[in-house]
Every structure is written in structure tokens, then in C-alpha cells.
Image (cartoon, helix red, strand yellow):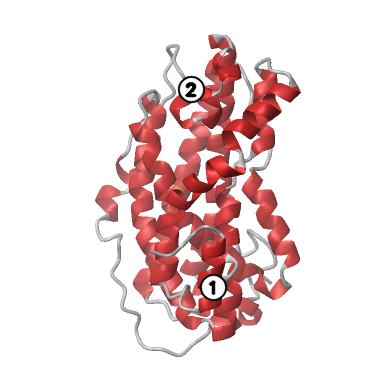
Amino acid sequence: MCGSVGMFLGCTALSACPLAELLRRDGGEVDYRSPFDRWDERASVRRAPRRLVEAEEGPYFPSELMAVADHPLVRALSPQDFRTVQLRHLHRYLRFTIELETKYVNPVALALASHGYGLDLPARMKLDAMRVYTDEAYHALVATDLLMQSEERSGVPERRRPPGFAVAFAELVAQAPPGRTALLELVFVGVSETLITGTLSQLPRAREAPSGLRDAVRDHASDEARHHRYFSAVLAEVWSALSAEDRVEVGALVPTLIDIFLRPDLDPVAADLVEAGLTEDQAALVVAETMGDERVAGQRARVAESAVRAFEAAGALADTAVRHAFEDAGLPAA
Ligand SMILES: [Fe+2]
Ligand SMILES: [Fe+2]
């Protein structure tokens, strides 16, 4: 059974998979326009060179994209201590990418390519799922490579821990009925794949971005633009296959899934600041004043806009209760 993340791999119980039953439907051919027509020329895995962490001195991560960087207590750190904060930020950014691609997106991509969750997906859509799978494996490879290079350059090993989204999503799944797990994983990946381009678009434009990281993120963003279109089509298929009752139940959970994905991971940031020389009280103050709920709420709504649009286009917000759940979460439809 598809009981937890990653369990689709080699799944032999598809005929009994609750999601396959839930989504099985009769239907005509899906009208699908592939975003991957020129994938062989355009995919990063096909055309991009290896990305390198520069050997010379320079920032590991652009400070303009680090919420804590503007706080007076952080500005007062020595350049060396601030570089440590930037290095830790880079490590967490890359670990987030590796975990997301390998443990969440790719198990779903593989499931779409194989059984397709019982949806009546065209063969081209299943083949495209394998292209997504290949892209995501490449993104995880690049992130791992950059992480190892940065460890070597700095002599500072990553302080490895699971990203906050992984912990929060596991808690949500644990509270849901067991038969819901596969659907929640699919919809969570739908969330991440329809809003990730917003996140990725900022780094390549950052003034201070080191060139290897900037180019790697630009590669990633160009692949994700195709994934966004692909998963928008997948979500439309999922929603048209759900019963009216399930649409309301799952649709009302989407704002929570968006929040889980975008919620800042505060404890590791505070730990980074303590490592750089702040006291625990100072670190807590910096985090509260730069990454508190009010500061991030507006930002979150902007970043989530593209995902909200994708779910709306899929029909997820057609029900009034679901629409209200989005509005209550500060994520109004366009
Ligand atoms: Fe990716
Ligand atoms: Fe993706």
C-alpha cells in the first residue's frame, strides 16, 4: 500500500491502492498539450555544464535574500561570522532541494509515470512524468554537488537535519485517515511544483549571488517552468476525478499544504546565529523581528499566487467552503 512517502517505488499492490480506487474513472481522451516538446534541447540535464562553487573569497549566499541579514544585531557581526551565517543558509537551501526532489516530487512523478493513480492519463503525459523524474534527479544531483563543494571549500560540514516542511507534512499525514496518504502526497507535490518557480525566480537576480549558485538556480527555474504547466494539468485531472465530497475535503486542506511548504524554519536559523556569536536571546529576537508571522504573511501570499491560480484553474476553488478556506488563510483567488 502507498502508506508513506517513497512507498510508491516498486509498489506491487496497485490494484488495491486506495487512491487508485478513489480516482479511477471512465473518460474520454484528456486534452493534453505537452510542455516538454523541446525537452531534449532545453532540459538542464541535457545542456548545462557542471556548476561550481567559486574558489575565491565571496558570499556563499546572497544576503539580500536572507531575512535576518538586515537586523542590526546581524549587521554588527564580523564579516567572518556573517559568512558562516550565509554558508549555513546555503546548506539549508540545498538540503531543502535535495529532500524535496528525492523524497517527495520524484516518488509522485514515478507513480504518475507508472500507474498514474488510476487516472486515465494519455501515454504522452506518463512519458512526461519520466522527464520530470529525470529533471528532479538532476536538480538533486546539482544541489548535492554544490553542497559537497561548499563543505570542501569552507571546511565546515553541513549540520544535517530534515527541513521543517518534512516534519510538518509527516504530522499532517499522521492525522489524516490512512487511505488519504497517497492523495495528500500527490496534492502536496502539486503545491510545491506550482509555486516553486516564484521562489526560484528571485535568486538569479540577486546582486550578490555567487555565479555557480546563480547559474544552477537559473537552470532549475527554467526546468520548473515546464513542471508548473505539467502539474497544473495533473491537478486538473485529479480534481475532475474526485467526488464532490472529496473535492471539498482535500481542497480545504490546500491552504495548509501551502503553509507547510512556505513556513520559515525558524529554529535552525536561530542556531546559525548562535553559532555566529549571538546569545540565544539575541538570536530569538532577530528571528522574531525579521521572520515573524506578520513579516512573512504578505510575502507568502505573493509567492503562493501561482499555486492558487493553478488550483483555481483545476476547479479546486469551485466550492464555496474551499474558497473560504483559501480566503481565511490569506490566499484569495484572483
Ligand atoms: Fe526541481
Ligand atoms: Fe519540479
Q: Amino acid at mark 1?
A: Val
Q: Distance of mark 2 from mark 1, alpha carbons?
A: 41 Å
Q: Residues within 10 Å of mark 1 (few under 14, many from 20)?
A: many
Mark 2 or mark 1: name the one nearer the start of the chain: 2
Q: Nearer the viewer, residue 221 or 45?
A: 221
Residue at screen point 29% across, 41% down: 47
Q: Is residue 43 visible?
A: yes
- Above or below, 252 against 219 in this view is below
Quadrant assignment, res 177: bottom right
Badge count? 2
Residue at screen point 44% across, 15% down: 58
Mark 2 lies on a secondary structure that is loop
The image shows residue 154 at horizontal and vertical percentages of 56, 16
Which residue lies under the disc numbered 1?
322
Q: Could you tell me which quadrant the N terminus lies in?
A: bottom right
Q: Nearer the viewer, residue 117 or 298?
A: 298
Quadrant assignment, res 52: top left
In this picture, residue 133 sits left or right of residue 167? left
Residue at screen point 64% across, 72% down: 12
Which residue lies under the disc numbered 2?
60
Mark 1 lies on a secondary structure that is helix
- Above or below, 34 against 283 in this view is below
Quadrant assignment, res 178: bottom right
